[in-house]
Image (spheres, rainbow, N blue to C red):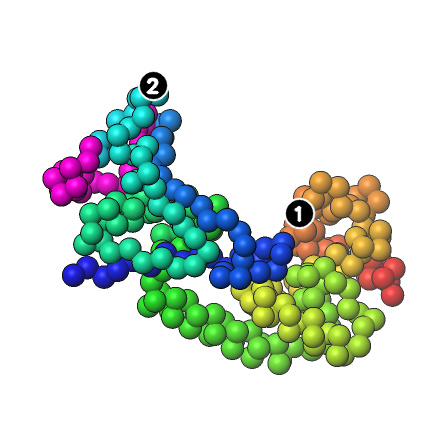
Amino acid sequence: MARVVTIKPLQKEKWHGKKNADSFTQPISLSALYNPKTGKYDTGLSKKDKERLEKETGYDLSDSFDPNKPHPFWDSRAALLTLPNHSIILNPDLPLDYIKIAIAKASKHVANSLTDYENGLYPDATHVIYDENEEVASKAKKVALLKEAYKIANKLNKQSKIALILIISGQTAKRQSDEFIEVALHDIIENKTEEFLSYANKTKAELTTRAMILDAVNENILQMKKGSIYYMDELLGNTITEAVEYLNDPKNQNLKIIINEKLL
């Protein structure tokens, strides 16, 4: 017997604050859709699958599309896959379940794996094909990243923490209490772990200069126009990264000192 396939709703925050079984979001129904590029239905079935399943079900499973005539199977209720707000289990040993699994895998609304979804391959997904081993591995990876993030955070000085808070969350924390800084950093680590690690592993010079630029933009000492950074009419860079490199260049230290003094 083949292993059953579980399709689960993704835990996305809704405007009503409800999740999963508590959510009153309407179930969605999927079917094989017409693909304008191929001129056929996206059934998700291989030629071998199609031939086998036609024999087992007696249905016409061809992917041919006629705009003037509904398909005897793909446009019928038998081909609909309804995805509710709770998990469903499909058995690939059952012909109709096998077909619905194929429809799910061919749909943009169903991520083929949690990893694919987290990597941004299914931005329109509402559900995911669930693999317990994959989910355990994904959670273990997140735990490892959190441990690494907190280990790094414990070694940061106050100035670096303030810089990270400004860079990642946009919050100005330089005049806030130590408690505020610790809470803000904790929220970043918990909710934006990978982004925290990305910036926390940069050099101190790059980190502090980036924060200085953002602070100076907020104070209107520097101007940001369409992503480019200016000091008066002087272009520092077309991106923040370019501006950081410009101000960290030894020959531009006088300007960096001027900007810092204006921030005091």
Badge 2 density bin: few <14, some 14–19, many ≥20, Cα 10 Å: few
Q: Is residue 264 left or right of residue 89?
A: right
Side of 34 relative to 219 (left or right): left
- At horizontal 69% and vertical 75% (from top left) the residue drawn is 183
Dot 1 surroundings within 10 Å: few (below 14), some, or many (20 or more)? Answer: some
**Looking at the image, residue 94 lies above or below residue 166:** above
State the SS at label 2.
Answer: loop
Residue farthest to the front, as pictured: 77
Label 1 vs label 2, nearer the camera: 2
Can you identify the residue that label 2 sits on? Answer: 68
- Where residue 33 sits: x, y (%)? 36, 34
Name the foreground residue: 105 vs 189.
105
x%, y% of residue 133?
A: 33, 68
Q: Residue at x 68, y 61 (%)?
A: 169
Placement of the C terminus among the 4 image quadrants? bottom right
Q: Is residue 121 visible?
A: no
Q: Is residue 173 above or below residue 28?
A: below
Residue occupied by mark 1: 239
Q: Amino acid at mark 1?
A: Thr
Using the rendered view, name the quadrant where residue 163 is placed.
bottom right
Query: In x, y percent, where is residue 67?
Result: 35, 21
Q: Is residue 59 magenta?
A: yes
Q: Amino acid at mark 2?
A: Asn
* Above or below: residue 120 compared with residue 4: above
Picture residue at 28% right of the left edge, 55% below the top:
90
Q: Which residues are magenta?
A: 38-60
Q: CA distance from mark 1 to mark 2?
A: 53 Å
Q: Is residue 235 above or below residue 251?
A: above
Q: What is the secondary structure assignment of the residue under circle 1?
A: loop
